[in-house]
Image: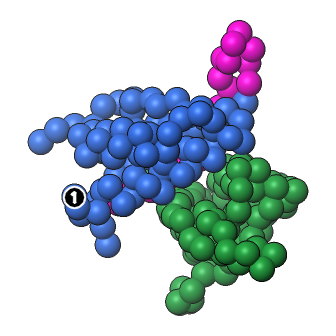
Chain colours: A green, B blue
Amino acid sequence: MTQSPPTPEVLRVSGQSRPNAVAGAVAALLRSQGQVEVQAIGPAAVNQAVKALAIARGYLVGNALDLTVQPEFIKLEDQHEERTALRFLVCAVPQP
Amino acid sequence: MTQSPPTPEVLRVSGQSRPNAVAGAVAALLRSQGQVEVQAIGPAAVNQAVKALAIARGYLVGNALDLTVQPEFIKLEDQHEERTALRFLVCAVPQP
């Protein structure tokens, strides 16, 4: 039996991130660890992150898994400036 | 005992929507019905929707509730054109 790590792996997504690539990483981490944290700063990055999460749900179907997301605000350092970012805590759940 | 309706209420969010107002509507529907669907077309709208969901989590704390989100792609009619949109299925869950 594996135990979830106390802090999930963090994937930082930008407006230039490819949603399919991020989705693959999200799905892999959910399969192996059951959770992952995705961070995004700004509307373009948030949009890419959400697209990646929607795509990742499809990748998990073959594992009888789905995912749920809980978004929250966090402060992140970006080029030496503190900016408000969005953090998505993503958890694997069994498919209904 | 109330039963969840078969199809959740739909809130359509635009890039001009105020996240606090959307958050209030999301929280109210989660309290009364346990679920709500949020739709957004385009990066600005998706960003406002996610901000609203992050804010709504704070509004639910006093009710001992939290929310989980499942994003997916849908086709929506926008000014007589079919566009790909994001749909967030939002469910109320007990606070851990």
The x, y position of residue B60, in whole percent, is 30, 56
Question: Disc 1 designates what residue?
Answer: B63
Q: Residues within 10 Å of mark 1 (few under 14, many from 20)?
A: few
Task: Please say if B59 is above or below B20.
Answer: below
Of residue A31 and residue A7, the one placed in the foreground of this image is A7
Q: Position of residue B64 (x, y in %)?
A: 24, 63
- Magenta part of the protein: which range? B66-83
Q: Residue at x 65, y 23 (%)?
A: B76
In the image, what residue occupies the spot 71% across and 50% down?
A43
Q: Quadrant of residue B75?
A: top right
Whether the magenta-drawn stretch holds residue B89 is answered as: no
B74 left or right, relative to B4: right
Q: Is residue B95 left or right of residue A72?
A: left
Label 1 SS: helix
Q: Disc 1 is attached to a residue of which chain? A: B
Q: Is residue B95 above or below residue A79?
A: above
